[in-house]
Amino acid sequence: MKSLKISLVALLLVAANFAWAQKAPKNAEERATAKTEQLNQQVTLTPEQQKAAYDAYLQNAQQMDADRAKYKNNVTELRAARLQNQQVLDESIKKILTDAQKAKLDKIAQEQKAKQRQIGQLKTDETKSGK
């Protein structure tokens, strides 16, 4: 019975991993397209803004791929490179957006941070209570 339970858990983990891998964008172009679509849903971009955002996201994704290969065995350097790439991307996106779109995006970011803090607080509370 115990081995059956272990087998079922292993099967579920494999299935979940496979499902996640199916949904995750694979290459830089797909990731850039997905991020552009997400931004468009959040702030409604013009066609020109969509093209500029796609270009920025594509450049970022390609740089991330290059950094991942370059710093394959150095997590600290990879984190530093990702932080720098994110800052460059943020600046590029800010140049594309109107003031109203920036305000809307900032509000969304604040809401997401608040959710993350709340989730973190819930996890901390659970740990403290011994759950």
Image (tube, grey):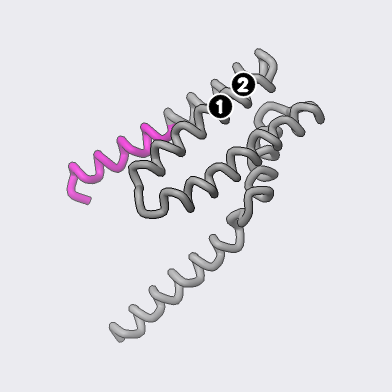
Q: Which of 123 and 62 is in front in this view?
A: 62
Q: Which residue is drawn at 59% across and 43% down?
A: 61
Q: Position of residue 82 (x, y in %)?
A: 46, 38
State which region is magenta: 115-131
- Residue sticking out furthest to the right: 47
Q: Count numbered badges in the picture.
A: 2
Magenta: main secondary structure equals helix
Along the horizontal axis of the image, is 118 left or right of 87? left
Q: Which residue is drawn at 70% across and 36% down?
A: 55
Q: In which quarter of the image is the N terminus?
A: bottom left
- Residue sticking out furthest to the front: 70
Q: What element carries label 2?
A: helix
Q: What residue type is labelled 2?
A: Lys
Q: Work out whether residue 41 can be spotted.
A: no
Q: What residue type is labelled 1?
A: Asp
Q: Nearer the viewer, residue 129 or 97?
A: 97
Q: Which residue is drawn at 31% across and 39% down?
A: 122
**Residue under label 1:** 90
Is 130 inside the magenta-drawn segment?
yes
Along the horizontal axis of the image, is 115 left or right of 42? left
Q: Which of 4 and 105 is in front in this view?
A: 105
Q: Badge 1 local density, few (<14 within 10 Å), some, or many (20+)?
A: few
Q: Position of residue 57 (x, y in %)?
A: 63, 37
Asked if the residue at tag 2 contacts the one at tag 1, i.e. Cβ–Cβ closer than 8 Å, the answer is yes
Q: Where is residue 128 in the image (x, y as percent from the top left)?
A: 18, 42
Looking at the rendering, which quadrant does residue 80 occupy? top left
Q: Residue at x 44, y 29 (%)?
A: 113
Q: Position of residue 58 (x, y in %)?
A: 65, 41
Above-or-below relation of 16 to 70: below
**Residue under label 2:** 94
